[in-house]
Image (tube, rainbow, N blue to C red):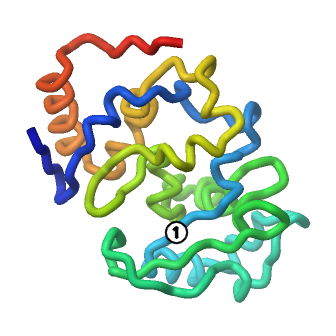
């Protein structure tokens, strides 16, 4: 049965796909961020509007030249504005990733008393989830590139269980509760047991 929540089709794979329990930068150095991310045009504009603040949270491995932060803008219907741009790779990692594996966008927000994801692109926030052709699904291609998160011995949870906060951020409490009900309809109340 197809389920749509907040305009997004839900791929049932999110309930069963194995993943790590949660993010731990000390174990992976923010490896999922090494390759950059696509950002909505409005997200890019907000980041550039806050560029002087963000630069304060960048280190010597990053460039403070904002003209080097983004790739060319392109059309993409999976973004709210219909347009996106990739973040540039600088020193073999996303331009916003510092030498310790932390995001300068998130640091700028939290250090200034703002909500931690205020400046962070939605596709960064929701990883290992992604939105593809209007469907909320698992970014399995990106997961496969990762040295820590792709290893079955670390995958003791599911993508759904590992991303509760992120799903609430994306769908709201009501949308998350609807998603939870959908999970129960599909696979019952029990948690999925991950086979190693």
Image coords of residue 48 (percent x, y): 59, 82
Which residue shows up at 32% across the image and 30% down it?
A: 15
* Residue 49 image offset from top left, x and y in percent: 57, 83
Tell me: 187 left or right of 16. Answer: left
Q: Seen from this angle, which residue lies furthest left?
A: 1
Count the numbered circles shown. Answer: 1
The residue identified by callout 1 is: 38
From what the image shows, is residue 180 above or below residue 39?
above
Pick the residue in front: 140 or 164. Answer: 140
> Label 1: few (<14), some or many (≥20) within 10 Å?
many
Q: Within the image, what quadrant is residue 97 found in?
A: bottom right
Q: Quadrant of residue 173?
A: top left
Which quarter of the rendering shows the C terminus? top right
Tell me residue 180's x, y (percent).
21, 30
Write the residue at 90% across / 66% down.
60
Residue at position x 44%, y 60% from top?
A: 122
Residue 114 at what x, y percent from top left?
53, 58
Q: Is residue 174 left or right of residue 45?
A: left
Name above or below for residue 109 compared with residue 50: above
């Amino acid at each position: 049965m197809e389920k749509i929540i907040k305009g997004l089709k839900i791929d049932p794979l999110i309930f069963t796909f194995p993943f790590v329990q949660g993010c731990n930068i000390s174990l992976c150095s923010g490896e999922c961020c090494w390759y950059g991310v696509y950002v909505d045009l409005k997200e890019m504009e907000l980041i550039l509007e806050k560029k002087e603040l963000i630069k304060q949270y960048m280190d010597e491995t990053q460039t403070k030249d904002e003209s080097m932060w983004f790739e060319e803008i392109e059309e993409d219907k999976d973004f709210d504005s219909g347009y996106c741009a990739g973040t540039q790779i600088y020193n073999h990692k996303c331009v916003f990733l510092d030498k310790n594996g932390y995001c300068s966008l998130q640091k700028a927000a939290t250090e200034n008393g703002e909500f931690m994801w205020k400046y962070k692109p939605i596709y960064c926030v929701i990883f290992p989830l992604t939105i593809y052709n209007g469907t909320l699904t698992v970014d399995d291609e990106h997961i496969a590139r990762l040295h820590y998160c792709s290893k079955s011995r670390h995958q003791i949870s599911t993508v759904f269980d590992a991303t509760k906060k992120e799903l609430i951020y994306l769908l709201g409490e009501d949308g998350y509760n609807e998603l939870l009900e959908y999970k129960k309809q599909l696979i019952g109340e029990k948690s999925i047991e991950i086979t190693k």
